[in-house]
Image (tube, rainbow, N blue to C red):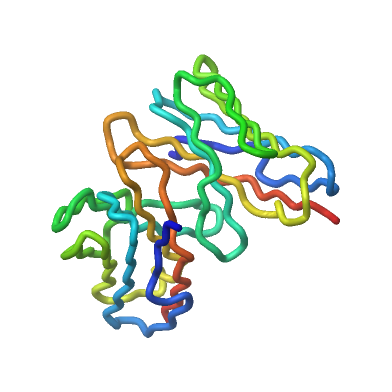
């Protein structure tokens, strides 16, 4: 089964609102990564948070990590129509090369 | 600017054909990956390579093979294409195993 599972599966908001997506994982991690995918395109790396970090910011993105709960959240503030995309969390296997991607959250931002 | 390119954006092949999907990265990355992405199933790892001429099976290697003769190039081969291999194929590379991955634009393959 997938290491990372996102919640919700889909989210529809108005431009200017904040969007929060959650990710849960099952085993120990070295880091957790978030990616964006526009329709029909490849994934783009957004942000990486290490297992010893609790929060990280990048522009309008804020990521939190709670290793005790094995969960992470991605917050996009002041959303724009251009943020419409699917968002995936990903966790590299500890000790390995494989990275497990969740099923993704589809975000739709209405102008 | 880092770049991963894939040989085709769209490809249509017939059942039984041999299909080559090529991926090139210009970042001198050690690791390269091939995934397929299907609705409801997310990204699934087909094969990866951590060095030239080295390859490891991912979660769904059946029906696929790979080749990495040069560091920058990683090819995915469908020996005899079947309709259940119709999918979006994504190539990625990373500097080290735990690092973020850089993806190509994807190849949407249709097998008729």
Residue A53 in the image: above or below residue B68: above
Q: Is residue A19 left or right of residue B108?
A: right
Q: Residue at x 85, y 56 (%)?
A: A111
Q: Is residue B100 left or right of residue B49?
A: right
Specify the farthest residue to the left: B53
User: Viewer-proximal residue, B47 or A65?
Assistant: A65
Label total for image: 0
Classify the position of the N terminus of chain B by image quarter: bottom left
Q: Residue at x 51, y 42 (%)?
A: A102
Expressed as whole percent of the image width and height from the top left, the position of residue A6 reads 59, 38
Expressed as whole percent of the image width and height from the top left, the position of residue A41 reads 54, 63
Q: Quadrant of residue B78?
A: bottom left
Q: Is residue B29 left or right of residue A16?
A: left
Expressed as whole percent of the image width and height from the top left, the position of residue B13 reads 39, 83
Classify the position of the C terminus of chain B by image quarter: bottom left
Residue B27 in the image: above or below residue B9: above
Q: Residue at x 47, y 43 (%)?
A: A101
Specify the farthest residue to the top: A68
Residue A38 in the image: above or below residue A30: below
Q: Residue at x 37, y 85 (%)?
A: B14
Expressed as whole percent of the image width and height from the top left, the position of residue B17 reads 29, 83
User: Viewer-proximal residue, B49 or B30?
Assistant: B30
């Amino acid at each position: 089964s997938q290491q990372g599972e996102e919640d919700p599966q889909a989210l529809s908001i108005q431009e200017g609102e904040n969007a929060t997506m959650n990710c849960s994982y099952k085993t120990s991690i070295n880091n957790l990564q978030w990616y964006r995918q526009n329709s029909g395109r490849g994934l783009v790396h957004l942000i990486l948070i290490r297992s010893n970090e609790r929060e990280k910011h990048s522009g309008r993105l804020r990521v939190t990590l709670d290793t005790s709960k094995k969960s992470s959240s991605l917050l996009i503030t002041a959303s724009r129509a251009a943020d419409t995309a699917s968002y995936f969390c990903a966790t590299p296997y500890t000790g390995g090369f494989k990275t497990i991607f969740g099923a993704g959250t589809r975000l739709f931002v209405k102008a | 600017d880092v770049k991963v390119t894939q040989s085709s954006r769209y490809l249509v092949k017939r059942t039984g054909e041999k299909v080559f999907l090529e991926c090139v990265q210009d970042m001198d990355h050690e690791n390269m990956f091939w995934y397929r992405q299907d609705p409801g199933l997310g990204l699934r790892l087909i094969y990866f390579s951590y060095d030239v001429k080295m390859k490891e099976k991912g979660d769904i290697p059946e029906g696929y093979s790979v080749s990495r003769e040069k560091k920058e190039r990683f090819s995915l081969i469908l020996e005899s294409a079947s309709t259940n291999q119709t999918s979006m194929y994504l190539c990625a590379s990373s500097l080290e195993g735990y690092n973020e991955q850089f993806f190509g634009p994807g190849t949407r393959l249709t097998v008729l």
